[in-house]
Image (spheres, grey):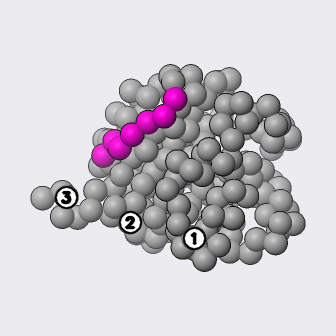
Amino acid sequence: MGCYPHQLSFLIDNPIRRLLISPRQFADRLSLTDSSRVLEIGPGSGYFSLEIARRTSRGHLELFDLQVEMLAKARRKLEAAGLRHIGYTKGDAADLPFPAASFDVVALAAVFGEIPEKRRCAESLFRVIRPGGVAVFHEHLPDPDILRLSTLRTLVEGAGFRFSRTWGHWYNYTAVFERPAALDLV
């Protein structure tokens, strides 16, 4: 259906969304350390970003979005909280402009279904995650672009990731995929 309109970002921040998944729950599923390097793709106005940034105080959080307006909204929220270890990059998730093995964790919440070139995106994610790092996807209704777990697994495993675990139900789930360490591939 295309990217979520930045004019409706107030709906993403609606407290009712916590009934589906709270920022704390999502961050718990990322297995972060205070020095983690995290790429959040499609952060919107920063609904999850604030919690992720607080948990990676000695690391780095890179927000990556197609819409500069969403990045500006997230920046205002994070800077107001005094968080400065964050980068902001505009671009297409099918062609991530970061060096290989730059991140420990990549997080996408209700975003992957909106990306037109999902296979290229999954391959790009594989490239930028360090061996042993993880890609974490959250999908939930009422997102019209929700992906079934089986579809997500086919796309992400096809790029070289190994499925690790899942939480939730078909209509509201988080799936974790690991990039195998080089020795695991032999």
Whole-angstrom CA distance, mark 3 to mark 2, is 13 Å
Seen in the picture, residue 6 relative to 30 is either above or below; the reply is: above
Image vertical order of residue 55 relative to residue 9, above or below:
below
Write the start and end of the magenta stretch as one range. 162-168
Horizontal arrangement in the rendering, residue 80 relative to residue 54 (left or right) = right
Q: CA distance from mark 2 to mark 1?
A: 17 Å
Q: Are marks 3 and 1 in contact (CB under 8 Å)?
A: no
In this view of the protein, can residue 32 be seen by the observer?
A: yes
Identity, as a three-letter code, of the amino acid under mark 1: Asp
Nearer the observer, disc 3 or disc 1? 1
Observer-nearest of 19 and 156: 19
Please identify the quarter of the rendering in which residue 40 is found: bottom right
Q: Position of residue 75 (x, y in %)?
A: 79, 63
Q: Position of residue 123 (x, y in %)?
A: 39, 51
Check if residue 116 falls in the magenta segment: no
Q: Quadrant of the N terminus?
A: top right
Q: Residue 130: give its label.
A: 2
First in sequence: mark 2 vs mark 1: 1
Magenta highlight: main SS? strand
The label on residue 34 is 1
Kindly report the distance in space between the C-alpha atoms of the residues bearing marks 3 and 1.
Answer: 26 Å
Say which residue label 3 marks: 184
Q: Is residue 119 above or below residue 45?
A: above
- 10 Å crowding of disc 2: few (<14), some (14-19), many (20+): many
